[in-house]
Amino acid sequence: MTTIVGLSGSLRGGSFNTALLHATASLMPGDATLAVKTIHGIPLFNADDEAAGGIPAPVQELKASIAAADGLLLSTPEYNNSIPGVFKNAIDWLSRPNADIPRVFGGKPVAIIGASLSGFGTLLSQTAWLPVLRTLGTRPWFGGRLLVSHADRAFDPAGQLTDAALREQLRKFMADFVHFATLGRG
Protein backbone atom coordinates (compact mmCIF):
# COMPACT_ATOMS: atom_id res chain seq x y z
CA MET A 1 0.00 0.00 0.00
CA THR A 2 1.32 3.43 -0.97
CA THR A 3 0.87 6.19 1.59
CA ILE A 4 0.93 9.85 0.62
CA VAL A 5 0.83 12.60 3.24
CA GLY A 6 -1.30 15.56 2.15
CA LEU A 7 -0.53 18.87 3.81
CA SER A 8 -2.71 21.97 3.48
CA GLY A 9 -0.99 25.34 3.73
CA SER A 10 -4.04 27.09 5.15
CA LEU A 11 -5.22 27.58 8.72
CA ARG A 12 -8.68 28.84 7.66
CA GLY A 13 -11.61 26.71 8.82
CA GLY A 14 -13.28 26.81 5.39
CA SER A 15 -10.04 26.42 3.45
CA PHE A 16 -10.45 25.43 -0.19
CA ASN A 17 -7.00 23.80 -0.04
CA THR A 18 -7.98 21.60 2.89
CA ALA A 19 -11.24 20.75 1.10
CA LEU A 20 -9.17 19.89 -1.99
CA LEU A 21 -7.11 17.43 0.05
CA HIS A 22 -10.24 15.79 1.47
CA ALA A 23 -11.61 15.42 -2.06
CA THR A 24 -8.27 13.96 -3.11
CA ALA A 25 -8.42 11.37 -0.33
CA SER A 26 -11.67 10.05 -1.78
CA LEU A 27 -10.20 9.81 -5.29
CA MET A 28 -7.02 7.88 -4.56
CA PRO A 29 -6.18 4.75 -6.55
CA GLY A 30 -7.13 1.48 -4.82
CA ASP A 31 -3.53 0.70 -3.86
CA ALA A 32 -2.91 4.05 -2.15
CA THR A 33 -4.13 6.23 0.68
CA LEU A 34 -3.87 9.93 1.41
CA ALA A 35 -3.33 10.90 5.04
CA VAL A 36 -4.53 14.51 5.36
CA LYS A 37 -2.41 16.41 7.88
CA THR A 38 -2.50 19.92 9.25
CA ILE A 39 -0.09 22.69 10.17
CA HIS A 40 -2.32 23.79 13.07
CA GLY A 41 -0.38 24.02 16.32
CA ILE A 42 2.98 24.73 14.71
CA PRO A 43 4.41 27.88 16.32
CA LEU A 44 6.36 30.59 14.55
CA PHE A 45 9.91 29.37 14.04
CA ASN A 46 12.41 30.89 16.44
CA ALA A 47 15.87 29.37 16.83
CA ASP A 48 15.94 30.53 20.46
CA ASP A 49 12.77 28.54 21.17
CA GLU A 50 14.28 25.52 19.41
CA ALA A 51 17.46 25.80 21.50
CA ALA A 52 15.50 26.18 24.74
CA GLY A 53 12.77 23.59 24.19
CA GLY A 54 13.66 21.47 21.20
CA ILE A 55 11.29 20.58 18.40
CA PRO A 56 7.60 21.12 19.32
CA ALA A 57 5.44 17.97 19.53
CA PRO A 58 3.19 18.89 16.53
CA VAL A 59 6.32 19.30 14.39
CA GLN A 60 7.79 15.99 15.58
CA GLU A 61 4.54 14.15 14.80
CA LEU A 62 4.28 15.66 11.31
CA LYS A 63 7.96 14.94 10.59
CA ALA A 64 7.45 11.30 11.53
CA SER A 65 4.41 11.04 9.23
CA ILE A 66 6.24 12.58 6.28
CA ALA A 67 9.39 10.51 6.83
CA ALA A 68 7.32 7.28 6.87
CA ALA A 69 5.25 8.19 3.80
CA ASP A 70 5.96 7.24 0.20
CA GLY A 71 5.22 10.77 -1.00
CA LEU A 72 4.14 14.26 0.01
CA LEU A 73 1.33 16.30 -1.53
CA LEU A 74 1.35 20.03 -0.80
CA SER A 75 -1.96 21.84 -1.22
CA THR A 76 -0.89 25.46 -1.35
CA PRO A 77 -2.89 28.65 -1.26
CA GLU A 78 -1.42 31.70 -2.96
CA TYR A 79 -0.99 34.85 -0.91
CA ASN A 80 0.38 37.97 -2.61
CA ASN A 81 1.57 35.90 -5.58
CA SER A 82 3.66 33.51 -3.48
CA ILE A 83 3.88 30.93 -0.70
CA PRO A 84 1.74 31.55 2.40
CA GLY A 85 3.95 32.50 5.35
CA VAL A 86 2.34 29.96 7.69
CA PHE A 87 3.03 27.14 5.21
CA LYS A 88 6.67 28.12 4.69
CA ASN A 89 7.02 28.45 8.48
CA ALA A 90 5.79 24.86 8.90
CA ILE A 91 8.29 23.56 6.34
CA ASP A 92 11.04 25.56 8.06
CA TRP A 93 10.23 23.81 11.35
CA LEU A 94 10.03 20.43 9.61
CA SER A 95 13.59 20.94 8.34
CA ARG A 96 14.96 21.34 11.89
CA PRO A 97 17.47 20.25 12.93
CA ASN A 98 19.29 20.38 9.60
CA ALA A 99 20.55 16.83 10.12
CA ASP A 100 16.92 15.61 9.80
CA ILE A 101 16.42 16.98 6.27
CA PRO A 102 17.65 13.82 4.49
CA ARG A 103 15.47 11.59 6.69
CA VAL A 104 12.31 13.66 6.27
CA PHE A 105 12.66 15.10 2.77
CA GLY A 106 15.64 13.47 1.03
CA GLY A 107 14.48 11.94 -2.26
CA LYS A 108 10.84 12.22 -1.16
CA PRO A 109 8.45 12.38 -4.13
CA VAL A 110 6.50 15.66 -3.85
CA ALA A 111 3.57 16.99 -5.86
CA ILE A 112 1.91 20.39 -5.52
CA ILE A 113 -1.75 21.29 -6.00
CA GLY A 114 -3.65 24.38 -4.98
CA ALA A 115 -6.93 26.23 -4.98
CA SER A 116 -7.54 29.96 -5.13
CA LEU A 117 -10.35 32.41 -5.73
CA SER A 118 -8.31 34.05 -8.49
CA GLY A 119 -8.50 33.21 -12.16
CA PHE A 120 -4.87 32.04 -12.17
CA GLY A 121 -5.23 29.40 -9.48
CA THR A 122 -2.01 28.96 -7.53
CA LEU A 123 0.45 29.10 -10.42
CA LEU A 124 2.86 31.54 -8.78
CA SER A 125 2.75 29.87 -5.38
CA GLN A 126 3.41 26.44 -6.90
CA THR A 127 6.36 27.87 -8.80
CA ALA A 128 7.70 29.59 -5.66
CA TRP A 129 7.86 26.21 -3.89
CA LEU A 130 10.38 24.79 -6.38
CA PRO A 131 13.57 26.33 -4.89
CA VAL A 132 12.47 25.23 -1.42
CA LEU A 133 11.85 21.66 -2.59
CA ARG A 134 15.21 21.61 -4.38
CA THR A 135 16.99 22.84 -1.24
CA LEU A 136 15.35 20.09 0.82
CA GLY A 137 16.51 17.43 -1.65
CA THR A 138 13.03 16.25 -2.59
CA ARG A 139 12.10 14.55 -5.85
CA PRO A 140 9.44 16.92 -7.27
CA TRP A 141 6.93 15.47 -9.71
CA PHE A 142 6.56 17.51 -12.87
CA GLY A 143 4.20 15.12 -14.67
CA GLY A 144 1.12 17.24 -14.11
CA ARG A 145 -0.17 20.47 -12.72
CA LEU A 146 -3.38 20.97 -10.82
CA LEU A 147 -4.48 24.57 -10.39
CA VAL A 148 -7.99 25.23 -9.14
CA SER A 149 -9.04 28.74 -10.08
CA HIS A 150 -12.32 30.30 -8.92
CA ALA A 151 -12.39 27.74 -6.10
CA ASP A 152 -15.63 29.21 -4.77
CA ARG A 153 -17.34 27.77 -7.87
CA ALA A 154 -15.71 24.32 -7.59
CA PHE A 155 -16.82 23.60 -4.01
CA ASP A 156 -20.22 23.81 -2.37
CA PRO A 157 -20.71 25.66 0.96
CA ALA A 158 -19.98 22.42 2.86
CA GLY A 159 -16.58 22.11 1.15
CA GLN A 160 -17.55 19.27 -1.20
CA LEU A 161 -15.97 19.29 -4.65
CA THR A 162 -18.85 19.66 -7.11
CA ASP A 163 -16.96 20.14 -10.38
CA ALA A 164 -17.06 16.74 -12.16
CA ALA A 165 -14.31 17.62 -14.66
CA LEU A 166 -12.04 18.73 -11.82
CA ARG A 167 -12.78 15.51 -9.90
CA GLU A 168 -11.65 13.50 -12.92
CA GLN A 169 -8.55 15.67 -13.39
CA LEU A 170 -7.68 15.23 -9.70
CA ARG A 171 -8.22 11.45 -9.88
CA LYS A 172 -5.85 11.16 -12.84
CA PHE A 173 -3.31 13.54 -11.29
CA MET A 174 -3.12 11.39 -8.17
CA ALA A 175 -2.98 8.09 -10.06
CA ASP A 176 -0.01 9.44 -12.01
CA PHE A 177 1.67 10.85 -8.89
CA VAL A 178 1.23 7.59 -6.96
CA HIS A 179 2.84 5.76 -9.88
CA PHE A 180 5.75 8.24 -9.79
CA ALA A 181 6.08 7.88 -6.01
CA THR A 182 6.42 4.11 -6.30
CA LEU A 183 9.10 4.17 -9.02
CA GLY A 184 12.41 2.94 -7.69
CA ARG A 185 10.85 1.64 -4.51
CA GLY A 186 12.33 -1.72 -3.61
Image (cartoon, grey):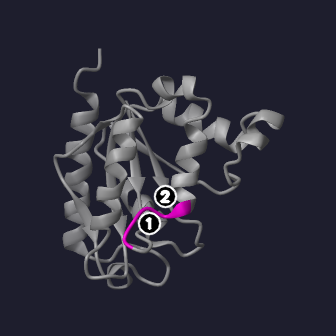
Residue 162 drawn at (x, y percent): 32, 77
The quadrant where residue 21 appears: bottom left
Q: Which residue is drawn at the image coordinates 25% and 76% (left, top)?
A: 120
Residue 42 drawn at (x, y percent): 67, 51
Horizontally, is 16 left or right of 146 in the view?
Answer: right
Magenta stretch: residue 49 in it?
A: no
Contact, CB < 8 Å: mark 1 with mark 2?
yes
The amino acid at mark 1 is Asn
Q: Which residue is mark 1?
A: 17
The quadrant where residue 32 appears: top left
Task: Please tell me how crowded label 2 is: few (under 14), some (14-19), or many (20+) other residues with Cα within 10 Å.
Answer: many
Furthest residue toward front: 48
Residue 172 drawn at (x, y percent): 19, 53
Q: Quadrant of the C terminus?
A: top left
Q: Looking at the image, which is closer to me, 23 or 106?
A: 106
Image height of 1 relative to 18, above or below: above
Q: Which residue is mark 2?
A: 8
Residue 108 drawn at (x, y percent): 37, 32
Whichever of callouts 1 and 2 sits on the residue coming sooner in the sequence is 2
Furthest residue toward top: 186
Image height of 21 relative to 52, above or below: below
Q: Which residue is drawn at the image coordinates 58% and 31% (left, top)?
A: 64
Q: Which residue is drawn at the image coordinates 67% and 49% (left, top)?
A: 45
Please name the predominant secondary structure of the magenta segment in the image. Answer: loop
Q: Which residue range is magenta in the image? A: 81-85
Q: Looking at the image, which is closer to me, 4 or 93?
A: 93
Q: Which residue is drawn at the image coordinates 65% and 37% (left, top)?
A: 61
Q: CA distance from mark 1 to mark 2?
A: 6 Å
Image height of 128 relative to 49, above or below: below
* Mark 2 secondary-structure assignment: strand
Horizontally, is 50 left or right of 112 in the view?
Answer: right
